[in-house]
Structure formats: structure tokens, C-alpha cells
Image (cartoon, rainbow, N blue to C red):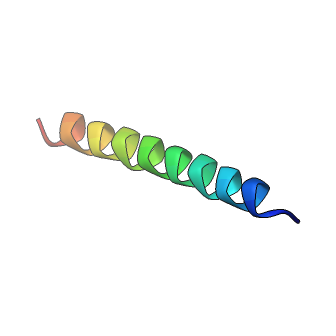
Amino acid sequence: MSRTSIIMMIITLGFYGIGFIYLLNKAFNSKKN
């Protein structure tokens, strides 16, 4: 695998991770209220 594809994979995983944490946080906050 080339370096650029590895970097793209890390960026994509990070993007999905942030989105997942954001959705979990939103669901948790709405449950609390």
C-alpha cells in the first residue's frame, strides 16, 4: 500500500470516528433531558 492511501484511510476513519462520537453525545444529551 502506498503512503497516500494509508493517509486517506486514517483521515476517513478519523472522520467517521468523530461523527460517531458526535451522534452518541447528541443521543446521550437528549436522553438526559
Q: Residue at x 68, y 50 (%)?
A: 8
Residue 12, x across and y down, in percent: 62, 47
> Looking at the rendering, which quadrant does residue 1 occupy?
bottom right
- In this rendering, position of residue 32 left or right of residue 10: left
Determine which quarter of the picture holds residue 9. bottom right
Classify 19 as above or below 9: above
Percent coordinates x, y for residue 7 in the rendering: 66, 57
**Measuring 45% from the left and 41% from the top, which residue is drawn there?**
19
Q: Estimate the x, y position of residue 15 in percent, counting from the top left.
A: 51, 45
Relative to 29, residue 7 above or below = below
Give the camera-side residue of 20 and 29: 20
In this view, the residue in front, 32 or 8, is: 8
Closer to us: 30 or 18: 18
Judged from this view, the residue extending furthest toward the left is: 33
Residue drawn where x is 15% and y is 43% of the image: 32
Residue 16 spot, x, y in % from top left: 55, 45
Q: Quadrant of residue 33?
A: top left
Q: In the image, is 12 to the left or to the right of 25?
A: right
How many circles with numbers are drawn on the protein? 0
Which residue shows up at 49% across the image and 52% down it?
17
